[in-house]
Amino acid sequence: VDPARALADFLELSEVGSQTSESDFQLVGGRLDNAKADREVQALLVVGFERYPDSQGLANLRDKVGDRIRQGDDLQALKDLEGLGYVGSD
């Protein structure tokens, strides 16, 4: 799986009038998460939260990815997730 291509294809589908649902965003985000494609998950979350701002599934995905990023040294990625509401878990 090419995470960047998968993300681009999904976002294109979601913009051309396709009826992508909240669960579609969660499914694709979960697959990207399984591939540890953190930047692609973040890009998906931006669009997902625009459409489904109260999605608990997307919030759970954001927190899971955020906790993993927090263990690394990508401060910009962590800052980007904080912009999506990530506060970290202790």
Image: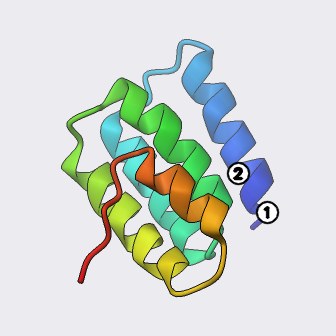
Q: From the image, which quarter does the N terminus lie in? A: bottom right
What label does residue 2 carry, if any? Answer: 1
Label 1: state its secondary structure. Answer: loop
- From the viewer's perspective, tell me whether residue 42 is left or right of residue 67: right
Label 2: state its secondary structure. Answer: helix
- From the viewer's perspective, tell me whether residue 39 is left or right of residue 4: left
Q: Amino acid at mark 2?
A: Ala
What residue sits 41% from the left and 27% below the top? 50
What label does residue 78 carry, if any? Answer: none
| Quadrant hosting residue 20 | top left
What residue sits 43% from the left and 53% below the top? 82
* Label 1: how many Cα within 10 Å (few below 14, some 14–19, many 20+): few
Q: Is residue 47 above or below residue 26?
A: above
Return the residue at label 2. 6
Q: Mark yes or no: residue 38 visible.
A: no
Q: Are marks 2 and 1 in contact (CB under 8 Å)?
A: yes
Q: Is residue 49 above or below residue 4?
A: above
- Residue 30 x %, y %: 46, 64
Q: Is residue 1 above or below residue 12?
A: below
Q: Amino acid at mark 1?
A: Asp
What residue sits 79% from the left and 63% below the top? 2
Q: From the image, which quarter does the C terminus lie in? A: bottom left
Near-viewer residue (28 or 42): 42
